[in-house]
Structures are given as C-alpha cells and as structure tokens.
Amino acid sequence: MNKIIIAVLVSAFAVAQAGAADMYVGVNLGSAQIDSPGFNSSNSFAILGGHSFNENIAAEIAYTNFGSESGGGITSKSSSMSISGVGSFPLNEQFSVFAKLGFASTTLEILGRSDSKSDLTYGFGGQFNLDKQIGVRLGYDVYKIGSVSSVDQKVMSIGAVFKF
C-alpha cells in the first residue's frame, strides 16, 4: 500500500508541473468513527491531490488512514484510497461550500483478517481561503467498509489545501 501511495504522490507532482495553476495538494486530520455499537473513535489522517477544472468542479484523489478503533475487546484498523468529483459553490471570495461523490477502495483489518471493499463514498464541507494559494477545510466524509457486514466509516476532519 505504501508503494501505491508514493507512486500516486509522485505522479500527482509530475502532472502538477504540466498544469500547475489548477492543481492542489492537501492534508486532513480528524476523528474517525465506525458506525457500529461499542467502537471508540480514532484519529485519522488523509493526504490528497486534486485538479480544479474551474471554480466549481474538481477531481480529487486521496489516501485516508482511519486509525485503530476498538470495541468489545476487538481492535480494527482501516484505510481507503478514493477518487471523487468535487462540486464547490463560492459564497464569497474567501469562503465556499463543497460536496464530494466518488469511489473508494477500503481495507479493514479485524481479528487478524483483512477485508477489502469497493463502494461509493461521499462527503461535504466548507473551505476558507486564507489567500489564493492556501485554504483551510472542514469536512465530513462517509466510506463503506467491510464486505461481510458493510458498515460506515465516518470521518470529521480539518485540513489545509495548497494550490499551485
């Protein structure tokens, strides 16, 4: 998985040189919660890259690590690779709201077994632009994890995006 992440980041950087004005990278830190009784929340992080086609439409790829969550004596770890379309609506020059819809491949490790699932993901949030290159995001995302008994992995995060 780490090799895939490195390859995606290197590719995003290489592509960024070709269309620099429309590219961005970012990082999110947050709290992840499995939508199943008894599980505690955990710290999550994400790295992302995107391409803005205009001020309203972008495409974004992301790697999200949901951390380790425990409940009922069981510990789980999960992560995701996703690609999403992002629709933004600027409210003024500095603040916009956004919604995301995409496809995620998630991995859930529980009781020594690894389980993968590919399904839709969605999210929404707001972004405050400090200047033309730096924005601060607050977001809420939902991923489907576990192919045997599908549950939601919900993430509330704050992050920064850097446009170049």
Image (tube, grey):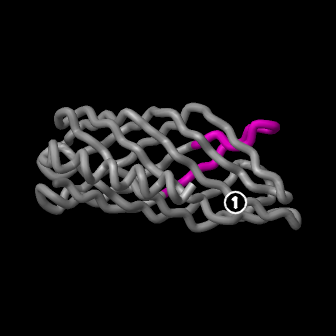
Left or right of residue 31, residue 46 in this image: left
Left or right of residue 46, residue 97 in this image: left
- Check disc 1 and report the residue beneath it: 77
Identified at 24% across, 56% down, the residue is: 128
Identify the image quadrant of the N terminus: bottom right
Residue 145 picture location, percent across and down: 68, 43
Q: Does the magenta portion include 115?
A: no
Residue 50 picture location, percent across and down: 30, 45
Along the line of sight, the residue nearer the viewer: 1 or 137 = 1
Identified at 38% across, 61% down, the residue is: 27
Number of on-image labels: 1
Left or right of residue 43, residue 150 in this image: right
Residue 16 picture location, percent across and down: 21, 48
Question: What segment is highlighted magenta in the picture?
Answer: 143-156
Element class at badge 1: strand
Along the line of sight, the residue nearer the viewer: 50 or 93 = 50
Identified at 23% across, 39% down, the residue is: 52
Mark 1, Cα crowd under 10 Å, few <14 / some 14-19 / many 20+, is some
Residue 22 lies, with reference to residue 10, above or below; the image says above
Identified at 67% across, 38% down, the residue is: 117
Identify the image quadrant of the C terminus: bottom left
Magenta segment, prevailing SS (helix, strand or loop): strand
Q: Which amino acid, mark 1?
A: Lys
Residue 67 quadrant = bottom right
Residue 68 picture location, percent across and down: 68, 65
